[in-house]
Image: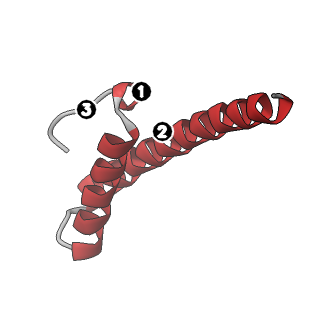
């Protein structure tokens, strides 16, 4: 993990791609312990970002559904 990125600026697709990349690196078993821990921590941040973006999308869909139901 040579560079830290601000996960709060990532789109869902970017965060998911980053998470997928980290999982592949961790599954390879080739990372030293410290890098594995850092990758895991970054993965948690990316996972939370994805979850947050999905929650926001769900809320927007709920609002749209309520508006359509009211018409």
Instruction: Please name whichever residue, 30 or 25, is drawn nearer the observer in this view of the structure.
Output: 25
Q: Is residue 16 above or below residue 60?
A: below
Instruction: Please name whichever residue, 6 or 29, is drawn nearer the observer in this view of the structure.
Output: 6
User: Residue 20 falls in which quadrant of the image?
Assistant: bottom left
Which residue carries the number 1 mark? 8
Viewer-nearest of discs 1 and 3: 1
Q: Is residue 50 left or right of residue 56?
A: left
Q: Is residue 60 left or right of residue 19?
A: right
For this orientation, the residue located farthest to the bottom is: 28
**Whole-percent x, y for residue 3 in the image:** 18, 34
Tell whether label 2 touches label 1 (CB within 8 Å). yes
**Whole-percent x, y for residue 57 in the image:** 57, 37
Q: Residue at x 36, y 50 (%)?
A: 16
Looking at the image, is mark 2 or mark 3 earlier in the sequence?
A: 3
Disc 2 secondary structure class: helix
Q: Residue at x 17, y 71 (%)?
A: 30
User: Residue 31 falls in which quadrant of the image?
Assistant: bottom left
Instruction: Point out the image quarter for the C terminus.
Output: top right
**Whole-percent x, y for residue 44 in the image:** 46, 48
Q: Residue at x 55, y 43 (%)?
A: 54
Q: Is residue 48 left or right of residue 63?
A: left
**Whole-percent x, y for residue 64 in the image:** 68, 32
The answer for how far apart the CA atoms under marks 1 and 2 are is 7 Å
Disc 3 secondary structure class: loop
Disc 1 secondary structure class: helix
Tell whether label 3 touches label 1 (CB within 8 Å). no
Circle 1 residues within 10 Å: few <14, some 14–19, many ≥20? some
- In the picture, the disc for residue 49 is 2
Q: Is residue 44 above or below residue 63?
A: below
């Amino acid at each position: 993990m040579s560079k830290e990125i601000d996960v709060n600026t990532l789109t869902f697709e970017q965060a998911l791609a980053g998470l997928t990349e980290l999982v592949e690196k961790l599954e390879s078993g080739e990372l030293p312990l410290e890098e594995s821990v850092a990758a895991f921590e970054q993965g948690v941040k990316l996972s939370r970002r994805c979850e947050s973006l999905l929650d926001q999308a769900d809320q927007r869909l709920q609002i749209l559904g309520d508006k359509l139901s009211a018409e």
